[in-house]
Each structure stands twice: as C-alpha cells, then as structure tokens.
C-alpha cells in the first residue's frame, strides 16, 4: 500500500512538532511510533511503513476540540477503550483531512493533558 505523499508530509510535521515539545521522547511500543512526556503517551503516530493508513491519535478533553476532531474525514474514537477517555484517531490520507497546523494544535492539547505541570510551564515560557 503506497503512502499518500501529503499524508506522509503531515505525519512528519506532526511527529517533528510533538518531539519538539519540552521533555518529549519517542518510543516504539507494539512496533508503532508514540511520543511521550514523563513516560506517558500524548500522541500515537502509528507506523509510517505503509502497512497501515497514516493516522494520529490524540487525547482531547476539551469538548469543542474533541467534537471538532471527530468531524474530520474518517475520524473515530480510538480503539481498545481509549475513546472513552477522550482519545480520537484522525486519518491523514483522507480527502479533506485536517491541515498539519491543526493537527499540531491537537497534539499540543493532548500534551497539556498528560504532561506534568513543570513541562507545561516550560512550554508556556517558550
């Protein structure tokens, strides 16, 4: 399965943004890419090898942002019961999928939900 070029560009921008947040680390549990703050996942980036459609999964506790994310083409509450906790999976290759800037806003919001206060303070100072 070929990875759509625009989806891969978005994925790379989102990954780069996520890893640029204070204290962010990249890990590969279950063979997929995740970004963590203080050992807690704040964005699931999936795999970029073409074996699955590119998507990002973020935790959005703000009702408006959560509802907005769910209006993205193909978006759905995350699997494994994570959807009940506010996690939303947003496919990147769908026509009309969100721009990288909006995805980065959602990644930042997800980060703010899971990161410790000291890292959020560091982000606010930047």
Image (cartoon, rainbow, N blue to C red):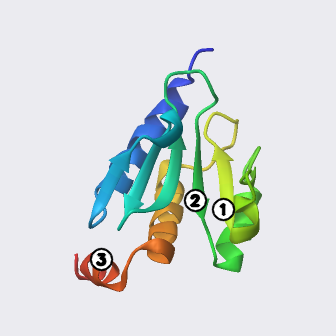
Q: Give the residue pinned by disc 3.
A: 119
Kindly indicate whether the residue at mark 3 contacts the one at mark 1 (C-beta within 8 angstroms): no
Quadrant placement of the C terminus: bottom left
Q: Nearer the viewer, residue 84 or 112?
A: 84
Under circle 3, the secondary element is helix
Kindly indicate whether the residue at mark 1 contacts the one at mark 2 (C-beta within 8 angstroms): yes
Q: Position of residue 85 (x, y in %)?
A: 69, 70
Relative vertical location of residue 103 with respect to residue 73 in this rendering, above or below: below
Quadrant placement of the N terminus: top right
Q: Give the residue pinned by disc 1.
A: 87
Kindly indicate whether the residue at mark 3 contacts the one at mark 2 (C-beta within 8 angstroms): no
Q: Nearer the viewer, residue 119 or 11?
A: 119
Under circle 2, the secondary element is strand
Q: Give the residue pinned by disc 2.
A: 58
Relative vertical location of residue 26 with respect to residue 83 in this rendering, above or below: above
Name the residue rendered at 48%, 62% in the picture: 42
């Amino acid at each position: 399965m070929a990875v759509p070029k625009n989806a891969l560009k978005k994925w790379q921008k989102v990954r780069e943004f996520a890893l640029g947040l204070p204290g962010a680390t990249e890990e590969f549990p279950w063979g997929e890419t995740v970004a963590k703050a203080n050992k807690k996942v704040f964005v699931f980036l999936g795999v970029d090898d073409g074996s699955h459609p590119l998507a990002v999964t973020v935790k959005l506790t703000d009702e408006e942002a959560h509802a907005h994310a769910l209006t993205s083409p193909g978006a759905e509450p995350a699997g494994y019961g994570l959807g009940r906790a506010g996690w939303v999976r947003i496919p990147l290759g769908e026509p009309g999928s969100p721009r990288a800037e909006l995805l980065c806003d959602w990644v930042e919001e997800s980060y703010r939900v899971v990161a410790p206060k000291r890292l959020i303070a560091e982000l606010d100072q930047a």
